[in-house]
Image (cartoon, coloured by chain):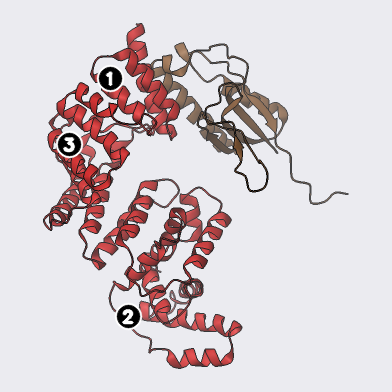
Chain colours: A red, B brown
Amino acid sequence: MDEALLRSLTPSVLTILVRRGADFAAAEDAVQDALVEALRVWPADPPRDAKGWLVTVAWRKFLDATRAEAARRRREYRVEEEPAPGPAPAVDDTLQLYFLCAHPSLSPASAVALTLRAVGGLTTRQIAQAYLVPETTMAQRISRAKRTVSGVRFDQPGDVATVLRVLYLVFNEGYSGDVDLAAEAIRLTRQLAAAIDHPEVAGLLALMLLHHARRAARTASDGSLVPLAQQDRGRWDTALIAEGVGILQAALARDRLGEFQAQAAIAALHADAPTAEETDWVQIVEWYDELTRLTDSPVVRLNRAVAVGEADGPRAGLAALAALDDSLPRHAAVAAYLHERDGDLATAARLYAEAAHKAPNLAERDHLTRQAARLNSRRCR
Amino acid sequence: MAKYLLLKHYRGAPAPVNNVPMDQWTPEEVTAHVQFMHDFAARLEKTGEFVHGQALAPEGAWVRYDGEGRPPVTDGPFPETKDLIAGWMVIDVDSYERAVELAGELSAAPGAGGKPIHEWLEVRPCLAEPPTITE
């Protein structure tokens, strides 16, 4: 039984049912029923056309369910309207599903859950594990999301930017549970990139690949964080980097710059440097300028201050930092780093301790505490 | 088996014996401490006594209902004087004695100078579900 095949077929089968007029929630239930049926029947009697089989069975399941509720006349009408089952063409069916699952009426958390379920074909249990919430909680979140979008018309063109934001959220959720959400996000973005011709989709895919390529080097064997400058660049995945750079270059060549392409360009410059010292910080600052223009995000300005510190020295970095609100996340950590490079170890140590206090996760907190400890023990001894 | 909550405090517990703030330790001491916590949890997972553990951010607020149609009252995000929980671990053990024994081991986590912190931990029994058969 090929579970990967089943999973890859799920979204297009679902899309076909909804296209034929099934309500989203009912269609989803019917597809799940059909998958269960497939698991039961296929091992002994594999179908010639897996997708056609699933569509037929899911549609029958949908009709059975509808029959139980709806009037006889409506059912007969539907049966009459039913198109002939058979091989359904084209991956771009799935595209509509991406837009539906990222619909602006959904909260980001719901959009993410629905995308993983409907487009990604993950089970509720797998999604719950990945987000460390009880399965019943996740089931509720998903069915609430399905209800929210059940009245949404399916043939409207959606907003690509919303879809990309949802996929980026999935990617950043990272590595907990037994489903690798980063890999899942890459898989879904690849699908999307195959279905739609859009430079920002390519930009996001490139960004994900470039980050993913460095993943093995990002943590030490004990789980602690390894900063970019200290990473063993031999452990970076050069194939993924080459692929990411290729996709990025093709996207940039089209001259429709967006924030994901700019971020990917920065990631590519890091990936391109043989050593941390050889990083082209001047060009990175230029990309941060573009990014600031595109997003005007304070977080981008904060990262830009780091890059300025590397390109023009810590004083310049601190000057760039001075223009920013010090309540920004990681502001203290950036300030600590720049003060240390400027030689003011006492201030750096104090700021590292403050940053550890505000750290959003354990790995970061431990890392920052170690930085403070390193400076304090060096000053005392 | 009964469940116990082990509470670690940022503030509110009596001062530990080896009371040096973590950022004044050496990096090796920090690493040893983190490793100790890891190993402790891993060992309890093996014995089947680990249920759940979670570290909390240092900031917390008191929140209270303030009447119909009004936003909840909070005492602000940076309280200076109240007790604060730093994290918890829930264990499922045979006896109160075992819970105390484990809390004692956890309190021996190494701190400055590689010596145990002797930090005070709070041990609280979780109230159990009612039994299926009562008579």
- Residue A175 higher or lower than A373, as above or below: below
Q: Is residue A100 left or right of residue B94?
A: left
Residue linked to disc 2: A88
Amino acid on which disc 2 is placed: Ala
List x then y, in percent, for residue A205.
25, 54
- Taking the view exactly as shown, the residue that stands out farthest to the top is A381
SS of the residue at dot 1?
A: helix
Figure label count: 3
Amino acid on which disc 1 is placed: His
Residue linked to disc 1: A339
Name the residue located 24 percent from the left edge and 14 percent from the top edge: A343
- Taking the view exactly as shown, the residue that stands out farthest to the right is B135
Q: Which mark is residue A285?
A: 3
Q: CA distance from mark 2 to mark 3?
A: 48 Å
Q: Earlier in the sequence, mark 2 or mark 1?
A: 2
Q: Residues within 10 Å of mark 1 (few under 14, many from 20)?
A: many
SS of the residue at dot 2?
A: loop
Q: Is residue A146 left or right of residue A185?
A: right
List x then y, in percent, for residue A51.
36, 77
